[in-house]
Image (cartoon, coloured by chain):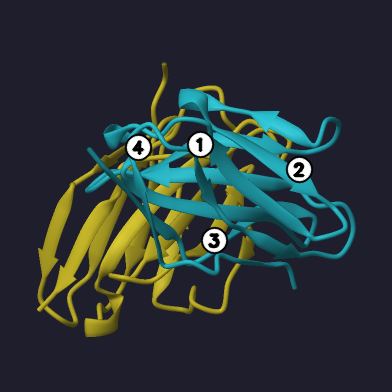
Amino acid sequence: EPEVTQTPSHQVTQMGQEVILRCVPISNHLYFYWYRQILGQKVEFLVSFYNNEISEKSEIFDDQFSVERPDGSNFTLKIRSTKLEDSAMYFCASSEDQVGNQPQHFGDGTRLSIL
Amino acid sequence: AQSVAQPEDQVNVAEGNPLTVKCTYSVSGNPYLFWYVQYPNRGLQFLLKYITGDNLVKGSYGFEAEFNKSQTSFHLKKPSALVSDSALYFCAVRDIRAGYSTLTFGKGTMLLVSP
């Protein structure tokens, strides 16, 4: 069964540094998402992406965050200047449709640790 | 805004016994409801969904969920629990933002199945 893959599995970064989290969505999916899960808390929506542009973003997704689909397969999340509170698990997801009839498929996540 | 509530932080059940993980929702319009499971250090795996139709929805690994509109509930059930079912379970509701579908998650319920 096709999967969403994320790299790296764990990223340790100094506060203030830039970090890029990478995702390869399922190949025939057109809608892409980033979520995050701070340790012990619920999964929170960050951003959705379709047709090479952001379709929606949450209050968490401020100017420090950006997303990009640099080629036909990768989908990246960049945090420009990391803060301690950015430490979390970041999950990429993709889906076939945007109305919710088809489920979102999640990757295994990248654990981001900010020192 | 859409929301889901999972009133139990943890559910304990003995192997072979039936299990129920509770979820209630608050939505405007027709609800699109989902259950996901998260094993340690893994991403979210889709279990089942309710969009329309029969109130009893069957999903992966023998799980099912019952949609109850009058009680605004979508409880996850399994007739006979396995130790391997021990994991973190998330209920989610479709949230439409600017016409695009995202997921709003509950805080999660840890299911512990004892041998």
Question: Are the residues under marks 3 and 4 on the same chain?
Answer: no
Mark 4 vs mark 1, foreground winner is 4
User: Eyeballing the image, is B7 above or below A54?
Assistant: below
- Residue designated by label 4: B85
Tell which subunit mark 1 falls on. B
**In front here: A26 or B49?**
B49
Residue A67: x and y in percent read: 45, 57
Q: Residue at x 72, y 56 (%)?
A: B73
Q: Residues within 10 Å of mark 3 (few under 14, many from 20)?
A: many
Sequence-first disc among 2 and 3? 3
Residue B72: x and y in percent read: 79, 60
The residue type indicated by label 3 comes to Val
Tell which subunit mark 2 falls on. A
Question: Are the residues under marks 1 and 2 on the same chain?
Answer: no
The residue type indicated by label 1 comes to Phe
Q: Residue at x 41, y 16 (%)?
A: A1
Q: Residues within 10 Å of mark 4 (few under 14, many from 20)?
A: some
The residue type indicated by label 2 comes to Val
- Residue designated by label 3: A47
SS for callout 3: strand
Indicate the chain coloured cyan by its letter.
B
Tell which subunit mark 3 falls on. A
SS for callout 1: strand
Q: Are marks 2 and 3 in contact (CB under 8 Å)?
A: no
- Residue designated by label 1: B46
Chain A colour is yellow
Q: CA distance from mark 4 to mark 2?
A: 30 Å
Q: Which mark is residue A99?
A: 2
